[in-house]
Amino acid sequence: MDMTKIEALKADIEGLAFSDDPPVVQQKSRDFFWYSPVLRHQLDRVTADIVVTPASEDDVRRVLAACYRHDVPLTVRGAGTGNYGQSVPLSGGVVLDISGMRAVTAIRDGAVTVEPGARAATINAATRADSNQELRVYPSTSRTATIGGFIAGGIGGIGAVRFGPLSEPGTVLGLRLLTMEAEPRVVVLTGDDVHKAMHSYGTTGVITELELGLAPAHDWVEVFVCFEKFMTAARFGNAVAASDEIVANEVGVIAAPFPHDGFLQHRAYFRANQHACILLVAAESLPALEALTAQFQGVTVFRSDRLSAADRTSLPPAEELVWNHTTLRAIRIDPTVTYLQVLYPPKNHLEHIENLLGKLTDEVITHLEFVRVGGELTCYAIPIVRYTTDDRLNEINAAYEDSGCLIFNPHRYTVEEGGMKRSDSDQLAFKRDADPKGLLNPGKMIAWEDPHFKVSARSMYLFPGLDTH
Ligand SMILES: Cc1cc2nc3c(=O)[nH]c(=O)nc-3n(C[C@H](O)[C@H](O)[C@H](O)COP(=O)(O)OP(=O)(O)OC[C@H]3O[C@@H](n4cnc5c(N)ncnc54)[C@H](O)[C@@H]3O)c2cc1C
């Protein structure tokens, strides 16, 4: 990056908190892309030039105007827990660390208004205390990730088995954002328009406020049910998720031997040959769950309502065993493994799971997360994969794609490849309006950089502006 531009920018933002100390800037230029051997190779040396920490929307406006004036790229960062290199500044410039803007500003029946840096756990504590409500969907990183980062970069999580991924109506009700222009404008998106800026990796504006849907809160009990056969565990998980008598906020299924080998603090509860269903179930649903468990001949090995006070404080919450926490625990034990992320087609997802299970046993430990999409039950697979080469990883991904799964490729840093979706024309049109110079998180939206690029599980988009200094 041309340092005269950065010096000019510094003069414009005088009085705002910033750091250009290289170790600080480098640390704030990274996220959890290192889950992927492919991205590790590409992004390890990428760094911004300066980190700016706004405390208010006015501060954000000043930084945007200065970046626009001096043609400096800007990448927003929440807590940097994204896995696809989403908040890695491919062309250097400014990292805007928004994590300090974290107020919960208003709570009403069915909705909460927050600043983007708020954590889901803090929001849930506030809405429970206020009116016994909680977020419909939140990530397993509820204690660390920002809510703005989740909406701009996440997919689903706890609650998705009832309310679906983030894109389902009723979860994100409104977004307020600032544009990257000479005089940044406030744009408020509501209804279907929120999709113009959701899951766009901060390429379409800086979100400064969010209105999110709330549901009545429950007293959630963590329950682990084990099975000798994986497909029985998967069918049981499906039955729990489909049941009208059981209110479940999380249904994850993880193949043996991982529950025993990977959930180290919970190891005593599992045997090595047991496949586990990890559940969050409303206390009032426990009798119905027990009846279903007996029907499937499952063994309940853990219930959080039966723990001693000491165990209750020493064990991590069950939400930190599921979604991408399963992957994190796998990589901590064996840094050579990695993962994939796919969505099974609804209706016959159990058949698809069984078919693929037979084909990939040696290289894959199956991990399922049940979810409702458009009201229909299906599940994501977030398998733990033994990594050998990039080509083999692409082949395994392609095996899922060929069997009809939708790929969310975690070894790519672009919006399109991460969701394996075609270019979103509404989002692109909105970006043209909100970021005419293309300074927001450059390289992350293929449609902006190269409209003719064809997304496929077998290829990778390489951003020509990638600056590794
Ligand atoms: C252990 C682990 C478990 C995880 N579990 C889940 C899970 O259950 N579900 C899930 O979906 N993901 C999960 N993830 C991925 C990630 O944690 C979530 O997507 C998370 O919510 C991202 O929040 P963040 O604050 O870390 O965002 P960051 O990583 O900092 O940013 C994510 C993206 O959002 C953009 N962004 C951030 N703030 C703003 C803003 N205010 N305006 C505009 N753009 C913005 C950034 O530029 C970036 O592109 C997990 C990751 C890890 C490491």
Image (cartoon, rainbow, N blue to C red):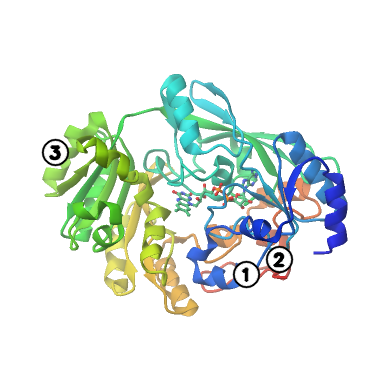
For mark 1, does the 10 Å Cα neighbourhood hold few (<14), some (14 to 19), or many (20 or more) residues?
some
* Image spot of residue 464 (x, y percent): 72, 71
Q: CA distance from mark 3 to mark 2?
A: 55 Å
Compared across the picture, whether 434 is left or right of 251 comes to right
Compared across the picture, whether 108 is left or right of 48 comes to left
Q: Earlier in the sequence, mark 3 or mark 1?
A: 3
Q: CA distance from mark 3 to mark 1?
A: 50 Å
Q: Give amino acid for label 2.
A: Asp
- Residue 222 seen in the current view: no
Q: Earlier in the sequence, mark 1 or mark 2?
A: 2
* Image spot of residue 357 (x, y percent): 28, 67
Q: Which residue is mark 1?
A: 461
Q: Is residue 188 above or below residue 144?
A: above
Residues at badges 1 and 2 in contact (C-beta under 8 Å)? yes
Residue drawn at x 77%, y 41% is: 16
* Image spot of residue 59 (x, y percent): 76, 38
Quarter in which the N terminus is drawn: bottom right
Q: Which residue is mark 2?
A: 450
Residues at badges 3 and 1 in contact (C-beta under 8 Å)? no
Residue drawn at x 24%, y 42% is: 223
Q: Which residue is mark 3?
A: 291
Q: Give amino acid for label 1.
A: Tyr
Residue drawn at x 25%, y 50% is: 277
